Image (cartoon, rainbow, N blue to C red):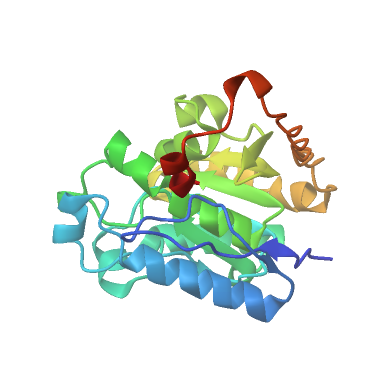
Amino acid sequence: MRNTCLAGVSPTVDGDPPGGRYDRRVSSPDERRDAIAQAAARARGCGRCPQLAATRTQVVFGSGDPDADLLVVADAPGREEDERGVSLLGRPRRVLDELLRETGIDPAAVWTTTALLCRPPDNRDPAPAELERCRAHLLAQVELVAPRVVCTLGTVATRVVRGVAEPILRVHGRTEVVELAGRRVRVLPVLHPAAALYRPQTLELLRRDLARLPGLLALPVPEQPRPVVVPPAAPLPPVAPDPAAGPPPDGQLGLF
Protein backbone atom coordinates (compact mmCIF):
# COMPACT_ATOMS: atom_id res chain seq x y z
CA MET A 1 0.00 0.00 0.00
CA ARG A 2 1.30 3.42 -0.97
CA ASN A 3 2.03 5.98 1.69
CA THR A 4 0.04 9.07 0.71
CA CYS A 5 1.20 11.17 3.65
CA LEU A 6 3.75 13.30 1.83
CA ALA A 7 5.12 16.74 2.39
CA GLY A 8 3.60 19.80 0.74
CA VAL A 9 5.25 22.46 -1.37
CA SER A 10 6.89 25.46 0.24
CA PRO A 11 6.91 28.94 -1.31
CA THR A 12 9.89 29.86 -3.49
CA VAL A 13 11.51 33.09 -4.58
CA ASP A 14 12.28 34.28 -8.14
CA GLY A 15 11.43 30.94 -9.70
CA ASP A 16 13.93 28.97 -7.65
CA PRO A 17 12.98 25.31 -7.07
CA PRO A 18 11.90 24.21 -3.61
CA GLY A 19 14.90 21.96 -3.00
CA GLY A 20 12.82 18.95 -2.14
CA ARG A 21 11.63 20.53 1.13
CA TYR A 22 7.98 21.26 1.83
CA ASP A 23 6.08 23.01 4.57
CA ARG A 24 2.82 21.04 4.78
CA ARG A 25 1.71 17.42 4.75
CA VAL A 26 -0.04 15.93 1.70
CA SER A 27 -2.65 13.56 3.07
CA SER A 28 -4.54 12.46 -0.05
CA PRO A 29 -3.84 11.53 -3.70
CA ASP A 30 -5.67 14.67 -4.84
CA GLU A 31 -3.42 16.85 -2.70
CA ARG A 32 -0.37 15.06 -4.07
CA ARG A 33 -1.46 15.76 -7.64
CA ASP A 34 -2.06 19.39 -6.74
CA ALA A 35 1.39 19.64 -5.16
CA ILE A 36 3.00 18.07 -8.25
CA ALA A 37 1.16 20.56 -10.46
CA GLN A 38 2.50 23.42 -8.32
CA ALA A 39 6.04 22.03 -8.52
CA ALA A 40 5.70 21.73 -12.31
CA ALA A 41 4.47 25.31 -12.59
CA ARG A 42 7.46 26.57 -10.62
CA ALA A 43 9.85 24.54 -12.73
CA ARG A 44 8.36 25.98 -15.93
CA GLY A 45 9.18 29.46 -14.68
CA CYS A 46 12.74 28.60 -13.69
CA GLY A 47 15.45 30.89 -15.06
CA ARG A 48 18.45 29.72 -13.05
CA CYS A 49 20.32 28.68 -16.22
CA PRO A 50 20.09 31.74 -18.53
CA GLN A 51 21.45 29.96 -21.61
CA LEU A 52 18.98 27.11 -21.30
CA ALA A 53 16.09 29.46 -20.56
CA ALA A 54 16.92 31.43 -23.71
CA THR A 55 17.09 28.43 -26.05
CA ARG A 56 14.51 25.96 -24.71
CA THR A 57 11.02 25.64 -26.14
CA GLN A 58 9.70 24.67 -22.73
CA VAL A 59 10.72 23.08 -19.44
CA VAL A 60 10.13 19.32 -19.61
CA PHE A 61 8.81 18.33 -16.20
CA GLY A 62 8.28 14.68 -15.32
CA SER A 63 5.12 12.83 -16.28
CA GLY A 64 3.36 9.53 -15.72
CA ASP A 65 1.64 7.99 -12.72
CA PRO A 66 1.95 10.26 -9.65
CA ASP A 67 1.33 7.17 -7.47
CA ALA A 68 4.16 5.23 -9.14
CA ASP A 69 6.34 2.82 -7.18
CA LEU A 70 8.97 3.15 -9.93
CA LEU A 71 10.52 6.48 -10.92
CA VAL A 72 12.78 6.53 -14.00
CA VAL A 73 15.39 9.27 -14.47
CA ALA A 74 16.98 9.93 -17.88
CA ASP A 75 19.63 12.54 -18.68
CA ALA A 76 18.10 15.55 -20.48
CA PRO A 77 15.41 16.35 -23.05
CA GLY A 78 16.22 16.11 -26.74
CA ARG A 79 14.56 17.93 -29.63
CA GLU A 80 11.34 15.92 -29.57
CA GLU A 81 10.96 16.13 -25.79
CA ASP A 82 11.61 19.88 -25.92
CA GLU A 83 8.87 20.32 -28.52
CA ARG A 84 6.27 18.10 -26.86
CA GLY A 85 7.07 18.68 -23.20
CA VAL A 86 7.30 14.96 -22.32
CA SER A 87 10.34 13.11 -20.98
CA LEU A 88 12.05 10.31 -22.93
CA LEU A 89 10.31 9.92 -26.28
CA GLY A 90 11.07 8.20 -29.58
CA ARG A 91 12.88 4.92 -30.03
CA PRO A 92 14.62 4.92 -26.62
CA ARG A 93 11.19 5.17 -24.95
CA ARG A 94 9.80 2.34 -27.06
CA VAL A 95 12.77 0.13 -26.13
CA LEU A 96 12.32 0.92 -22.43
CA ASP A 97 8.56 0.32 -22.52
CA GLU A 98 9.00 -3.01 -24.28
CA LEU A 99 11.58 -4.21 -21.75
CA LEU A 100 9.43 -3.06 -18.83
CA ARG A 101 6.49 -5.02 -20.20
CA GLU A 102 8.71 -8.09 -20.41
CA THR A 103 9.21 -7.81 -16.64
CA GLY A 104 5.48 -7.44 -16.01
CA ILE A 105 5.64 -3.69 -15.30
CA ASP A 106 3.08 -1.46 -17.01
CA PRO A 107 4.91 1.57 -18.46
CA ALA A 108 1.80 3.66 -17.73
CA ALA A 109 2.34 3.00 -14.02
CA VAL A 110 5.80 4.64 -14.03
CA TRP A 111 6.84 8.25 -13.40
CA THR A 112 9.52 9.41 -15.87
CA THR A 113 11.68 12.51 -15.62
CA THR A 114 15.16 13.80 -16.43
CA ALA A 115 18.12 15.03 -14.41
CA LEU A 116 18.04 18.27 -16.43
CA LEU A 117 14.61 19.64 -17.36
CA CYS A 118 15.73 21.86 -20.25
CA ARG A 119 17.20 20.80 -23.57
CA PRO A 120 20.89 21.80 -23.86
CA PRO A 121 21.64 23.70 -27.08
CA ASP A 122 22.55 21.40 -29.97
CA ASN A 123 21.97 18.43 -27.64
CA ARG A 124 25.32 18.97 -25.95
CA ASP A 125 26.06 17.23 -22.66
CA PRO A 126 24.55 18.97 -19.62
CA ALA A 127 27.05 21.12 -17.75
CA PRO A 128 27.75 20.15 -14.12
CA ALA A 129 26.52 23.55 -12.88
CA GLU A 130 23.26 23.12 -14.81
CA LEU A 131 22.68 19.70 -13.29
CA GLU A 132 23.36 21.06 -9.81
CA ARG A 133 20.89 23.92 -10.27
CA CYS A 134 18.24 21.53 -11.56
CA ARG A 135 18.74 18.91 -8.87
CA ALA A 136 16.14 20.46 -6.60
CA HIS A 137 13.46 19.96 -9.27
CA LEU A 138 14.37 16.28 -9.36
CA LEU A 139 14.27 15.99 -5.57
CA ALA A 140 10.86 17.65 -5.52
CA GLN A 141 9.51 14.93 -7.80
CA VAL A 142 11.10 12.16 -5.78
CA GLU A 143 9.57 13.45 -2.57
CA LEU A 144 6.08 14.00 -4.00
CA VAL A 145 5.83 10.77 -6.00
CA ALA A 146 7.59 8.84 -3.20
CA PRO A 147 8.70 5.83 -5.29
CA ARG A 148 9.98 2.57 -3.85
CA VAL A 149 12.68 2.32 -6.55
CA VAL A 150 14.48 4.89 -8.70
CA CYS A 151 15.93 3.59 -11.97
CA THR A 152 18.59 5.80 -13.56
CA LEU A 153 19.32 5.62 -17.30
CA GLY A 154 22.93 6.21 -18.31
CA THR A 155 25.93 7.95 -16.79
CA VAL A 156 24.54 11.48 -16.33
CA ALA A 157 21.34 10.53 -14.50
CA THR A 158 23.17 7.97 -12.39
CA ARG A 159 25.81 10.49 -11.32
CA VAL A 160 23.20 13.07 -10.33
CA VAL A 161 21.14 10.62 -8.28
CA ARG A 162 24.04 8.79 -6.63
CA GLY A 163 26.24 11.86 -6.17
CA VAL A 164 29.27 9.87 -7.35
CA ALA A 165 30.98 10.09 -10.75
CA GLU A 166 31.45 6.53 -11.99
CA PRO A 167 31.05 5.12 -15.52
CA ILE A 168 27.69 3.44 -16.05
CA LEU A 169 29.45 0.31 -17.35
CA ARG A 170 30.96 -0.08 -13.90
CA VAL A 171 27.82 0.40 -11.80
CA HIS A 172 24.92 -0.79 -13.99
CA GLY A 173 22.74 -3.41 -12.36
CA ARG A 174 24.23 -2.71 -8.91
CA THR A 175 21.49 -1.73 -6.47
CA GLU A 176 22.12 0.56 -3.53
CA VAL A 177 20.07 2.57 -1.06
CA VAL A 178 20.40 6.34 -1.53
CA GLU A 179 18.88 9.15 0.52
CA LEU A 180 17.00 11.59 -1.71
CA ALA A 181 14.89 14.47 -0.42
CA GLY A 182 14.99 13.05 3.08
CA ARG A 183 13.84 9.56 2.00
CA ARG A 184 15.87 6.42 1.49
CA VAL A 185 15.08 4.65 -1.77
CA ARG A 186 16.64 1.83 -3.73
CA VAL A 187 18.45 2.99 -6.85
CA LEU A 188 19.08 0.74 -9.85
CA PRO A 189 21.45 2.22 -12.48
CA VAL A 190 21.05 0.80 -15.99
CA LEU A 191 22.36 1.57 -19.45
CA HIS A 192 20.47 4.19 -21.43
CA PRO A 193 18.03 2.63 -23.94
CA ALA A 194 19.51 4.82 -26.68
CA ALA A 195 22.78 2.91 -26.29
CA ALA A 196 20.92 -0.34 -26.91
CA LEU A 197 19.40 0.66 -30.25
CA TYR A 198 22.26 -0.63 -32.39
CA ARG A 199 24.13 -2.96 -30.04
CA PRO A 200 22.53 -6.34 -29.29
CA GLN A 201 24.96 -6.94 -26.41
CA THR A 202 23.95 -3.66 -24.77
CA LEU A 203 20.29 -4.51 -25.23
CA GLU A 204 20.79 -7.81 -23.42
CA LEU A 205 22.60 -6.08 -20.55
CA LEU A 206 19.74 -3.61 -20.25
CA ARG A 207 17.17 -6.41 -20.37
CA ARG A 208 19.00 -8.33 -17.65
CA ASP A 209 19.28 -5.30 -15.37
CA LEU A 210 15.65 -4.24 -15.79
CA ALA A 211 14.56 -7.80 -15.00
CA ARG A 212 15.62 -7.08 -11.42
CA LEU A 213 12.96 -4.42 -10.96
CA PRO A 214 10.01 -6.64 -9.91
CA GLY A 215 12.08 -8.17 -7.14
CA LEU A 216 13.26 -4.78 -5.94
CA LEU A 217 9.73 -3.39 -5.96
CA ALA A 218 8.58 -6.32 -3.82
CA LEU A 219 11.14 -5.62 -1.09
CA PRO A 220 10.17 -3.68 2.05
CA VAL A 221 10.82 0.04 1.95
CA PRO A 222 14.34 0.77 3.30
CA GLU A 223 14.54 1.93 6.90
CA GLN A 224 13.98 5.66 6.88
CA PRO A 225 16.19 8.23 8.63
CA ARG A 226 14.87 9.37 11.96
CA PRO A 227 13.82 13.01 12.07
CA VAL A 228 16.10 15.25 14.05
CA VAL A 229 14.20 16.59 17.06
CA VAL A 230 15.57 19.85 18.41
CA PRO A 231 14.49 20.38 22.03
CA PRO A 232 13.06 23.80 22.84
CA ALA A 233 15.54 26.24 24.27
CA ALA A 234 15.35 26.70 28.04
CA PRO A 235 14.02 30.12 29.09
CA LEU A 236 16.65 32.61 30.12
CA PRO A 237 16.77 33.35 33.85
CA PRO A 238 15.58 36.84 34.85
CA VAL A 239 18.31 39.43 35.14
CA ALA A 240 18.56 40.90 38.64
CA PRO A 241 19.13 44.67 38.78
CA ASP A 242 22.58 45.82 39.82
CA PRO A 243 22.20 48.13 42.85
CA ALA A 244 25.66 49.57 42.29
CA ALA A 245 24.71 50.81 38.83
CA GLY A 246 21.94 53.05 40.08
CA PRO A 247 18.83 54.02 38.07
CA PRO A 248 19.19 54.81 34.34
CA PRO A 249 19.15 58.46 33.24
CA ASP A 250 15.67 59.80 32.42
CA GLY A 251 16.48 60.20 28.73
CA GLN A 252 17.31 56.51 28.40
CA LEU A 253 13.83 55.32 29.35
CA GLY A 254 12.48 56.15 25.90
CA LEU A 255 14.76 53.61 24.28
CA PHE A 256 13.02 50.59 25.84
Q: Name the residue nearer the viewer: 33 or 122.
A: 33
Instruction: Where is residue 31? Give x, y as percent.
Output: 64, 77
Left of 87 or right of it: where is 77? Answer: left
Quarter holding residue 104: bottom right
Q: Is residue 32 above or below residue 216?
A: below
Q: Is residue 195 above or below residue 128?
A: below
Q: Tell me how many marks there are.
A: 0
Q: Name the residue nearer the viewer: 174 or 120.
A: 120
Quarter holding residue 66: bottom right
Q: Is residue 198 above or below residue 141?
A: above
Q: Is residue 195 above or below residue 140?
A: above
Query: Residue farthest to the bottom?
Result: 30
Query: Can residue 60 be seen in this snapshot?
Result: no
Left of 143 or right of it: where is 253? Answer: left
Which part of the image, by quadrant, shows the N terminus?
bottom right
Query: Can residue 155 be seen in this snapshot?
Result: yes
Query: Residue farthest to the top?
Result: 244
Instruction: Where is residue 103? Give x, y as percent.
Output: 69, 57
Left of 77 or right of it: where is 10? Answer: right
Instruction: Where is residue 177? Give x, y as percent.
Output: 69, 35
Residue at screen point 34% across, 51% down:
76
Residue at screen point 71% across, 45% down:
212
Q: Name the residue nearer the viewer: 94 or 119.
A: 119
Residue at screen point 63% across, 72% down:
32
Instruction: Where is residue 167? Give x, y as percent.
Output: 44, 26
